[in-house]
Image (spheres, rainbow, N blue to C red):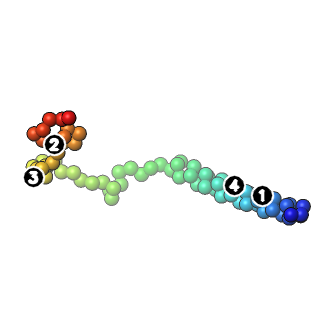
Amino acid sequence: MSLQDDLTAVRRCLDDLVRTVGRLERSLAQLRENESRPLVAGRADDLVTITDTPYNTALWTDSDDEGLGVRDRRAP
């Protein structure tokens, strides 16, 4: 490669670096802007109502206690 080709390649790489740094600066600025906004807590569409009525015991038949092993058997 000639000196001119080397200079052109370096110039192209520097231009790419400048564009990449610019994109990074813009994305960091946007991230900081989003972090400074207060979070909206307790929006009605995010809430789930849980009733106080007891669960149907049929839901728990044939279930194992997690971490305790199978019923009517001793742990290893």
Q: Earlier in the sequence, mark 1 or mark 4?
A: 1
* Of labels 3 and 4, the one closer to you: 3
Circle 2 sits on which residue?
70
| Relative to 45, 59 lies left or right | left
Work out which quarter of the rendered image holds the C terminus and state it.
top left
**Where residue 53 is drawn, which disc sits there?**
none
Marks 3 and 2 sit apart, C-alpha to C-alpha, by: 17 Å
Marks 1 and 2 sit apart, C-alpha to C-alpha, by: 65 Å
Q: Amino acid at mark 2?
A: Val
| Relative to 25, 63 lies left or right | left
Is 55 or 68 nearer to us in this picture? 68
Circle 1 sits on which residue?
14
Other residues around mark 4 within 10 Å, as few (<14) / some (14–19) / many (≥20): few
Circle 3 sits on which residue?
58
Mark 3, secondary structure of its residue: helix
Q: Amino acid at mark 3?
A: Ala
The image quarter containing residue 11 is bottom right
Mark 4, secondary structure of its residue: helix
